[in-house]
């Protein structure tokens, strides 16, 4: 659903920007106020650079914003692996105890194998 909303918002912006850049081929002077830097460039190049810069900035913000989610997912994956190993260990212990109970003589009390934990 989020991707669909992103496409519904982003695609028209991209199309409008590309259409604007393609129809404005005039040359303009680009200057940065405190710096003595000036450059002659077309309006279309400025618009394309602005669109790309906006895309990159959005991607960086999204990447850092999802950092907590990725960290939480890694932590849950580690916990799940530990729990699975514990289940396997307990299954093995239960199977050994069941086998020992079947093999124990009738007159002797049954003991659990592997005691402790």
Image: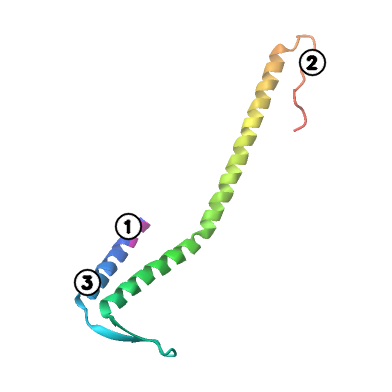
| In the displayed structure image, the side of residue 40 where residue 62 appears, left or right | right
Residue indicated by mark 3: 19
Q: Check residue 105 in the rendering and tell me which mark sits there, or answer none.
A: none
Tag 3's secondary structure? Answer: helix
In the rendered structure, the answer to whether residue 99 lies left or right of residue 16 reads right
Local secondary structure at mark 1: helix
Distance between the alpha carbons at the discs numbered 2 and 1: 67 Å
How far across and how far down the image is residue 107, in percent? 79, 9
- 79 drawn magenta: no
Tell me which secondary structure the magenta stretch mostly adopts: helix
In the image, which disc is placed on residue 4?
1
**Residue 41 percent coordinates (x, y):** 29, 81
| 59 is higher (above) or lower (below) than 20 | above
**Location of mark 2 (residue):** 109
Residue at position x 56%, y 45% in the image = 77
Observer-nearest of 78 and 102:
78
Identify the image quadrant of the N terminus: bottom left
17 or 81: nearer the viewer = 17
The span picked out in magenta is 2-6
Residue toward you, 111 or 46: 46
Q: Is residue 3 magenta?
A: yes
| Label 2: which secondary element | loop
From this viewpoint, which residue is outermost toward the left? Answer: 23
């Amino acid at each position: 659903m989020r991707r669909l909303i992103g496409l519904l918002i982003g695609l028209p912006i991209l199309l409008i920007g590309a259409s604007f850049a393609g129809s404005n081929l005039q040359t303009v002077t680009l200057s940065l106020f405190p710096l003595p830097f000036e450059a002659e460039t077309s309006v279309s190049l400025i618009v394309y650079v602005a669109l790309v810069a906006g895309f990159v900035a959005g991607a960086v913000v999204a990447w850092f914003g999802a950092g907590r989610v990725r960290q939480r997912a890694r932590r849950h994956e580690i916990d799940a692996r530990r729990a699975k190993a514990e289940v396997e260990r307990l299954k093995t212990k239960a199977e050994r105890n069941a086998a020992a109970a079947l093999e124990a003589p009738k007159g002797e009390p049954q003991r659990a194998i592997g005691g402790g934990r």
